[in-house]
Image (tube, grey):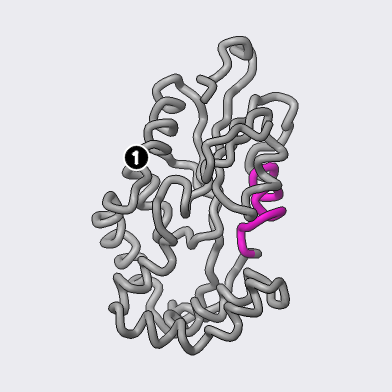
Amino acid sequence: MDSPDQHHREKMVLAAFDFDGTLTTADTMMAFIRFTHGRRRLATGILRHAHRLAMMKLGLYSNGKVKEMIFSHFYQGTSYEQFLRWGCEFAKEAETLFNDRTVEILQQHLSEGHTVCVVTASIDEWVRPICKMLGVGSVLATLIEVAPNGTLTGRFRSPNCYGKQKVARLLEAYPQRQNYLLYAYGDSRGDRELLALADKGYMLSSYRRIR
């Protein structure tokens, strides 16, 4: 794999990483639900939505809609303060989920003074504390809605940060695309648009450079 290009010193270097399956070896939404609700309740909750998950796999149901339904099933009515605490507590155990090879690439970018951000469909409140552990302060994740009484509505406040939304969120946070060299790292079809935007994009399921 290429090392960050030494011929673009005049430009800022931005390295954008997917989270689930890229910086981690597992789907952190499932891991987080298991952490907060236990293995049995996770299994029964997923079983309840199995038909929707199957339809999503067939392209008959949107990824974001199914994800929001599952999130609502487990967290609607939860105190936001409690949810924040869970996110911080989960981060302490998340080191076991890290993909060491990709984390090493991230750390290389940081050591060279590059700007690093994580762009993920996972929920901000559990991704951000984990990213803080990695030294990453820029997180572009799916945002959740909080009711005036401080509880979770079960709905998302932003579109699911997946596919084209990853590009939209990145360009919102880092406009003037011509002024920076973009590295992007992903592992699935939800990252294709982001990798296509990059000067150097890597599909890490095969550690293959696609741009």
Percent from the top left, x then y, of residue 93? 25, 57
Say whether residue 169 is left or right of residue 30: right
Q: Quadrant of the C terminus?
A: top right
**Residue 161 forms part of the magenta stretch:** yes
Amino acid at dot 1 = Asp
Q: Residue furthest front?
A: 206
Residue at coordinates 26% horizontally, 61% vertically from top-left?
A: 89
Answer above or below: position of 168 versus 159. Answer: above
Say whether residue 25 is left or right of residue 54: left
Say whether residue 27 is left or right of residue 69: left
Residue at coordinates 65% horizontally, 79% vertically from top-left?
A: 55
Percent from the top left, x then y, of residue 81? 35, 71
Answer above or below: position of 207 versus 190. Answer: above
The image quadrant of residue 60 is bottom right
Residue at coordinates 40% horizontally, 58% vertically from top-left?
A: 26
Within 10 Å of the Cα at label 1, are there few (<14), some (14-19), or many (20+) other Cα atoms?
A: some
Say whether residue 54 is left or right of residue 136: right
Q: What residue span does the magenta drawing correspond to?
A: 160-171
Residue linked to disc 1: 100
**Residue 124 forms part of the magenta stretch:** no
Percent from the top left, x then y, of residue 27? 44, 61
The image quadrant of residue 38 is bottom left
**Is the stretch drawn in magenta largely helix, strand or loop?**
helix
The total of numbered circles placed on residues is: 1
Percent from the top left, x then y, of residue 151? 44, 79
Secondary structure under tag 1 reads helix
Answer above or below: position of 110 versus 26. Answer: above
Residue at coordinates 52% horizontally, 40% vertically from top-left?
A: 117
